[in-house]
Image (cartoon, grey):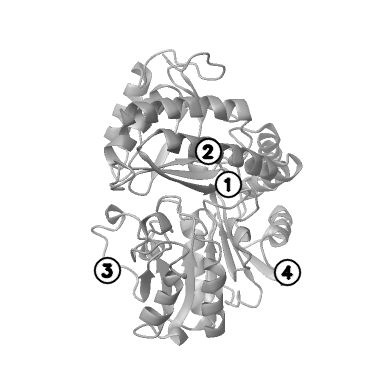
Amino acid sequence: MSSIGFVKYINMKTEPPGPKARKVVEETTRLLSPSIARFYPLVIEKAHGALVEDVDGNRYIDLNAGLGVLSVGSTPSPVVDAIKKQAEKFLHFSYTDFYYENIIKLAEKLVEITPGSWEKSVYYGNSGAEAVEAAIKLARYHTRRPRMLAFSGAFHGRTMGALSLTSSKTRQMKGFSPLLSGVTHVPYPYCYRCPYGKTFPDCGYFCTDFIQHEVLDKYVPAEEVAGVFFEPIQGEGGYVVPPPDFFKRLEKMMKPNGILMVDDEVQSGIGRTGKWFAIEHWGIEPDMVLIAKGIAAGMPLSALVAKKSVMTWEPGSHASTFGGNPLSAASALETLKMIEQGKLMENAERLGSQLMKRLNEMKEKYEIIGDVRGKGLMVGVEIVKDKRSKEFGIKEVERILDYSWKHGALLLSCGKSSLRIFPPLVIEQDMLDEGLDVVEEAIKRAAS
């Protein structure tokens, strides 16, 4: 099926979706909630590492890591063995009411790898949105302040509190108002499409000045703000990377006013960018770090790691029955060990550099690539109608995704018209290259 020359990993036996896949899609439509939107009708049968096989026997290269969750790839043997071993001991005994050991071992590791040398405490949940909800409550509880700041283009989840901070797509909030009160959104430094019409670095970081002069000085009293929530690299918003000094300037504005810095690393953390946490690229140490997705190789787990001096809520004020599940904790411990011992952060940095180089070469060749941005194996490619107008290439992205998955590369989009490339950290150079061959052919066809 593929027209990309010699194929080593991809094996397309039939044009997807095949007959078995179509049946699953039909039954899904009949039985499951219509609120869930999918990129294309891929129906997975099995997966290992960065390879995925569908129910019709087609084999694909995974360029999205199960939406950023599969940091160490699918079904890694050390993680599977750890889960089996824990499953033979006990499956569950709520950590909100009782005690067990492996969540302590995991907390020790999270305290070690998160930024900041101060004492920390860990709260466990099941998902990124749960970590965000916990952070909202803790920020208000600790500061006794009612307001929060968040950024336009942000995605923090879809539960009611997290949704109140989210502002990446209107369909995510349409029909759910009123949302949580006290949230003010400010523009994110999206330099390719500066909301102020300025150009970096001549702008002089007008984005941070705007927060101070047009928000805090005029209608949001700083002494009423509990925390500012941010993604170091915006995910759903388009894989937007802020300029070098943005977070240091933001911190300098927030800290003197007692406003907590809340770092949402749900998509960018756990080695994805070549460091444990993306915020380390900007050299600041947040008061809270929110972790999920890549932490447990596909098992449901999230963590809020906060300064011990901030995590001051009393027993019973917040809890989660399934948070810190022992199987998820066992999986997370092995995942972190694999990343460290396998030098997967170094792999992300090395392959990320090669990935950026190749994508920038494509940018020179194809008029529809407007911008390439990212760190490590978290890279966005903004597709436009043409470089001059920068008009969003929405239809072009649809064509690129459709061609790519039908020819064996599992690619996703984000923002209005950006491709996101974030494969498992275990992916090897030749496999990544083969996937990119498909993606480039898709871009070439969309451009013509």
Give the number of callouts.
4
Q: Is residue 332 above or below residue 120?
A: above
Q: Amino acid at mark 2?
A: Ala
Residue at the left extreme? Answer: 175
User: In the shown orientation, is residue 101 left or right of residue 32?
Assistant: right
| Residue toward you, 346 or 210 | 210
Q: CA distance from mark 2 to mark 1?
A: 9 Å
Decide which of 142, 118 is in the foreground and name it: 118
Q: Amino acid at mark 4?
A: Ser
Upstream in sequence: badge 1 or badge 4: 4
Dot 4 or dot 2, earlier in sequence: 2
Image point (29%, 27%), residue name: 26
Q: Is residue 403 above or below residue 194?
A: above
- Please determine whether, in this image, residue 32 is positioned above or below residue 253: above
The image shows residue 200 at horizontal and vertical percentages of: 45, 62
According to the picture, the residue beneath numbered tag 3 turns out to be 178
| Nearest to the observer: residue 446 or residue 94 | 446
Work out how far the residue at label 1 is from the one at label 4, CA to CA, in angstroms: 23 Å
Q: Secondary structure at mark 3?
A: loop
Residue 177 appears in the rendering: yes
Q: Residue at x 65, y 53 (%)?
A: 276
Q: Name the residue carrying label 2.
A: 65
Could you say whether the residue bearing mark 1 is in a helix, strand or loop?
Answer: helix
Q: Of marks 2 and 1, which one's residue comes earlier in the chain? A: 2
**Front disc: 1 or 4:** 4
Q: Residues within 10 Å of mark 2 (few under 14, many from 20)?
A: many
Disc number for residue 148:
none
Disc 4: which residue: 117
Q: Secondary structure at mark 4?
A: loop
**What x and y, as percent, mark residue 45?**
48, 24
What residue type is disc 1 on?
Answer: Gly
Where is mark 1, residue-wise? 294
